Amino acid sequence: MYMYKKTKKLLLLSISIGFIVALSSWGFLVHRTINQLAIYELPSPLNDFFYQHKQYLVYNSVRPDLRRNKDKTEATKHFVDLEAFEHDHSQMPVDENDAIKKYGEDSLKKYGYVPYYIITMMEKLTQAFKQRHVDSIIFFAADIGHYISDANVPLHTTLNYDGQLTNQKGIHALWESTIPEIELKSMDFYGKDQAKFLKTPEIQIWDAVRQAHALLPNFLAEEKQVSSRFTDDEKYNSSFRNGKEYKKYSGKFAKALYQSLKPTIENQIKASVSLVSDIWFTAWVNAGKPDLSKLTKENATIDYKKELKSDLEYYKTKQLIENDRLLSLQKNKSSDESE
Ligand SMILES: [Zn+2]
């Protein structure tokens, strides 16, 4: 949790005010959703293997964010502040070594290097496939799903990551947590893609980052536009903790902004899902398409093939939620930490 301090004179007591900001990534709900949906875009028999490990892939989709609490080097793997590197970010090298030569390692570690880190993780996933090492495959697959999804969040591509430079503090959590938590059930996040082999994954990853970045001006403008229809009291919810006031965009505001942005957020979820499945698939192909059927869990008690088949049907007919098949929305199965 990251807080801003600011004095609010209107309050009788001069107490500091903060914004509740989860400067992490898509909220937990969306990360879990993306890792599950990506399984459905994989071809057979790869989807079969991934589906068996669905629970693991979904619940560990948020592990990189949890790691940030303990590991100081973790945070900058989740974003890239494009403006810090280049005025014209099309000039940024897609290869990490070229970027290190151009900007220095310290700059990358300071302003973020998610596009390069995805490639590092992809190489590890490829190795894991080559070794047919189940634990490593699902470990890297879960993690890479997280980083790819972060790379598709506009606010993960900018120095103005929380609207702090444009007087719109709190927009980070608004985009990736507040809005999806309210609206996910009504979103059409179903893609039609089948995982593709990516000859140059670094280029596709950079395309995704740039495409996310290109959404920023409109997002910031819409926030201002919608704000003009709200009073401050309607726009924010306040709560008090330890003598401090914390502000968060209200549900009412989130709903209104969602309507005016539509379908931007669901499109970014779809883009994340596609790229996650493309990268999983590409790593498997690069590893020589190992036969994973031999790695089936010996004690698999559920008839996962049948379950996968019905899930695929629900995915096609956009009915996963109606049939309670989205793990991220299932109560008591996701009763772990929140942001
Ligand atoms: Zn993250």
Image (spheres, rainbow, N blue to C red):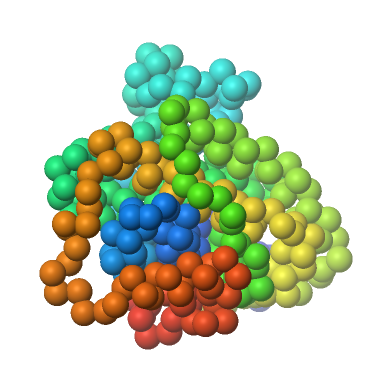
| 242 is higher (above) or lower (below) than 257 | below
Along the viewing direction, whichever of 321 and 40 lies nearer the viewer: 40
- Residue 124 occupies quadrant: top left
Along the viewing direction, whichever of 249 and 77 lies nearer the viewer: 77
Looking at the image, residue 307 sits to the left or right of residue 290; the answer is right
- Residue 309 occupies quadrant: bottom left
Regarding residue 68, the answer to whether it shows in the image is: no
Residue at image position (26%, 79%) is 302
Which residue ends up furthest to the right in the rendered image?
Answer: 229
Quadrant position of the N terminus in the picture: bottom left
Residue at image position (73%, 42%) is 217
| 254 is higher (above) or lower (below) than 191 | below
Quadrant position of the C terminus in the picture: bottom left
Which residue ends up furthest to the bottom in the rendered image?
Answer: 332
Looking at the image, residue 268 sits to the left or right of residue 194; the answer is right
Residue at image position (31%, 73%) is 304
Regarding residue 196, the answer to whether it shows in the image is: yes
Along the viewing direction, whichever of 17 and 298 lies nearer the viewer: 298
